[in-house]
Image: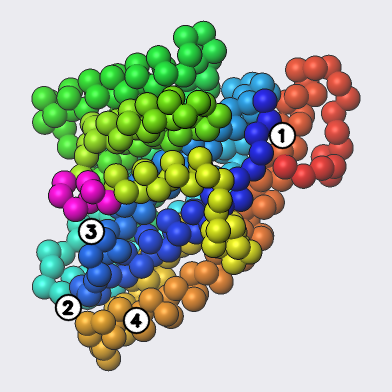
Amino acid sequence: MERQRIDSLDGLRGIAALWVLVGHAMGLTGWGVPVIDRPALGVDLFIILSGFLMAYHYGEMRKGAAAFWAKRFFRIAPLYYVCLAAALILGPELYADRMAIDAMRGASPQASSRYLDASPTNIAMHVSFLFGIFPSHAFRTPLPDWSIGLEMQFYAIFPLLVLAAKKWGWLCVILTAFLIGWSAVMGLRLSGMEFPMPSFLPLKIGLFLVGVLCAISADASRERKIAYLLLAVLLSQFPSAPNGTDQLIRLIIILAFFALIYSRKGGFLDSRIMRGLGEISYGCYLIHLLLLIPAIAYWAEYFEGWQLFAVSLASAGAATLALSWIAYRFIELPGIAIGGRIIALMQARRTGAKPLSWRAGKS
């Protein structure tokens, strides 16, 4: 079944991207506002959104798993590969700037491998999106791409979840997936294996499933909505829950997300500005550190404290938004279009219909 698009979710993606951008600016300059200075919570919001959108539009799976994977690959990979190449080329300069920032703040210096590893192995791990399942490669570029590998892992298993849900129902599948993820995390802890970032799917499976629960509850009765919400709150706390204030903020995020979906009243999130910000949110997420780190290293010679934060965010933020729009227009949209054409060819082969012209149609 085709689902109606929820425009306010674009605005919510924009909020998540800004949260990560501002949070990293606060963390790097040493001046911050509680909660906003936690970009990991903005990533959590992205993860819940991803789980929701996959399940909400799972009717697209009628085209087959191969078409689903092709669509997701061409949505994620083109801009990621461009940013990955830029990060590897600029690695030495970014490392020098980051070392200057750490020295300014009196922080422990960064591991050089995160900025300087341009080895064939590291490149292959990232090009194949396998880096997230290996602790030694999960956080080994200047990009905040650990969550990209995490997303690709979820996309890899999602068609299997859909097939299982058709047979046993979504609720059974969600609980089973959560228990498998929880068991995997317990196994990691017993083995002593640690990830520098939660890039391995079992570590964040609870949040993806929160999004899925919200999607399947969208058309449910009031009683089921309440039950699904309570289950979502429970799943969000495991297998890797934040502590203290972060735990409370994550709970508020989940409650607000469910309220937004149930009410379908986006308000400001439905505005043209916020929808536009949502469209470029992926580029904003990938690009911002490539600009923010040099900006802070430069301005640190002239400012400190909140002034350093403000001028760095203003300069790097404006450049990030501009480059994100360019990337969306000239990299992301063409990539999506290519993916759409490939899917059309795949469908034509399946049905025996005459393939559309390579130049025809848009994704």
Kind of residue at disc 3: Ser
User: Disc 2 marks which residue?
Assistant: 104
Ranked by sequence position, the earlier of labels 3 and 4 is 3
Magenta residues, as a range? 243-249
Ranked by sequence position, the earlier of labels 2 and 1 is 2
Q: In the visual, does 156 lie left or right of 347?
A: left
Determine the CA span between mark 1 and mark 3: 40 Å
How would you rate the neighbour count of disc 2 (Cα within 10 Å): few for under 14, some for 14-19, many for 20 or more? some
- As rendered, which of 98 and 314 lies closer to the eye? 314
Kind of residue at disc 4: Ala
How would you rate the neighbour count of disc 4 (Cα within 10 Å): few for under 14, some for 14-19, many for 20 or more? some
Majority SS type along the magenta span: helix
Determine the CA span between mark 3 and mark 4: 28 Å
SS of the residue under disc 1? helix
Kind of residue at disc 1: Ile
Image coordinates of residue 162 in percent, x first then y, are: 52, 20
Contact, CB < 8 Å: mark 2 with mark 3? Answer: no
- As rendered, which of 62 and 298 lies closer to the eye? 62
User: Disc 3 marks which residue?
Assistant: 112
**Residue found farthest to the top:** 167
User: Disc 4 marks which residue?
Assistant: 310
Q: How many marks?
A: 4
Q: Quadrant of residue 307?
A: bottom left
Image coordinates of residue 226 in percent, x first then y, are: 39, 30
Way the structure is coloured:
rainbow
Determine the CA span between mark 4 and mark 1: 45 Å
- As rendered, which of 84 and 219 lies closer to the eye? 219
User: Disc 1 marks which residue?
Assistant: 342
Kind of residue at disc 2: Met
SS of the residue under disc 2? helix
